[in-house]
């Protein structure tokens, strides 16, 4: 599975060079704020296409716009956040999942995310960063374990680089969130790998050895105790 490098940058979204710029939009607030600035730089093409396609920022909706080299991004992916009054962490997670799935379908290996205006939303900048990194990792996940070339095995082609553009005020918080989200996604994808192994490989012994290896790798932060058959009988575990 491809690993993704995350970083932040203090730069205007309209000035960043990227294959895909990802911008969240609240329902019926488009074009507004940062989107309005981008729309102006793109000679109004964002608003024009949004009107044509009926994009209003509804929750989990997405729209891709070619910028025709008016800004540094080749394409802009707008994703809907729904009503601002109803926005919370659950909505954010669902919305960024839809956005990153849309990005994955475009087969880009890097993208830039514009930090959201979260003032008054109850969602912190750190939570935003954590959500971005977590769901990039989860959407990036592919199952290639035992596929041969004939059976459809392909080299991982997920996102190798994700940049979050933001102001200096929230940059440190977003960086902490990105680090936490990377750890969360790694742990969840590790569990997915185990679940996707056949029982002939993922035996009880295999799981125990994997847990011990994790404990060693984490330098004692995770305590691991392996119960043998006699231990289980002594505890009356049955089965």
Image (spheres, helix red, strand yellow):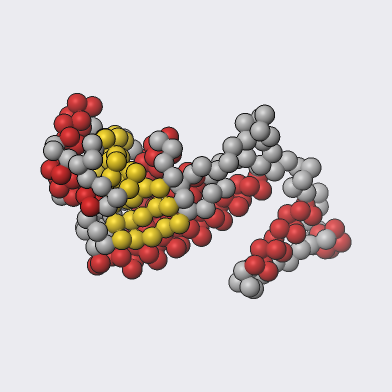
Residue under the point 43% across and 52% down: 161
Furthest residue in direction bottom, as rendered? 220
Q: Position of residue 162 (x, y in %)?
A: 40, 52
Residue under the point 36% across and 55% down: 163
Residue 69 shows in the view: yes
Classify 146 as above or below 214. Answer: above
Q: Nearer the viewer, residue 235 or 108?
A: 108
Residue 86 shows in the view: no
Furthest residue in direction front, as rendered? 69
Classify 8 as above or below 103. Answer: below
Residue under the point 29% across and 34% down: 63
Residue under the point 18% across and 45% down: 38
Left or right, 7 with respect to 192, comes to left
Classify 234 as above or below 18. Answer: below
Q: Position of residue 150 (x, y in %)?
A: 67, 29
Q: Nearer the viewer, residue 212 or 121?
A: 212
Q: Nearer the viewer, residue 142 or 229?
A: 142
The quarter of the displayed image where residue 31 is located: top left
């Amino acid at each position: 599975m491809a690993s993704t490098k995350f970083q932040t940058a203090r730069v205007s979204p309209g000035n960043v060079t990227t294959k895909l710029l990802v911008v969240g939009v609240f329902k019926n607030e488009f074009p507004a704020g940062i989107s309005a600035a981008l729309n102006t730089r793109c000679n109004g093409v964002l608003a024009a296409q949004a009107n044509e396609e009926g994009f209003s920022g509804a929750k989990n909706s997405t729209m891709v716009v070619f910028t025709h080299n008016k800004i540094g991004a080749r394409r802009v992916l707008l994703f809907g956040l729904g009503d601002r009054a109803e926005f919370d962490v659950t909505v954010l997670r669902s919305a960024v999942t839809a956005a990153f799935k849309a990005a994955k379908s475009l087969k880009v290996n890097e993208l830039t995310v514009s930090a959201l205006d979260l003032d008054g939303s109850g969602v912190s900048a750190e939570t935003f960063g954590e959500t971005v990194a977590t769901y990039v990792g989860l959407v990036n996940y592919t199952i290639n374990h035992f596929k041969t070339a004939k059976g459809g095995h392909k080299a991982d082609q997920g996102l190798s680089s994700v940049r979050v553009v933001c102001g200096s005020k929230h940059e440190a918080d977003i960086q902490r969130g990105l680090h936490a989200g990377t750890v969360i996604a790694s742990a969840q994808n590790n569990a997915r790998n185990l679940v996707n192994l056949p029982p002939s490989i993922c035996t009880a012994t295999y799981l125990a050895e994997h847990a011990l290896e994790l404990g060693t790798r984490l330098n004692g932060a995770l305590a691991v105790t392996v119960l043998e058959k006699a231990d289980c009988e002594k505890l009356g575990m049955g089965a």
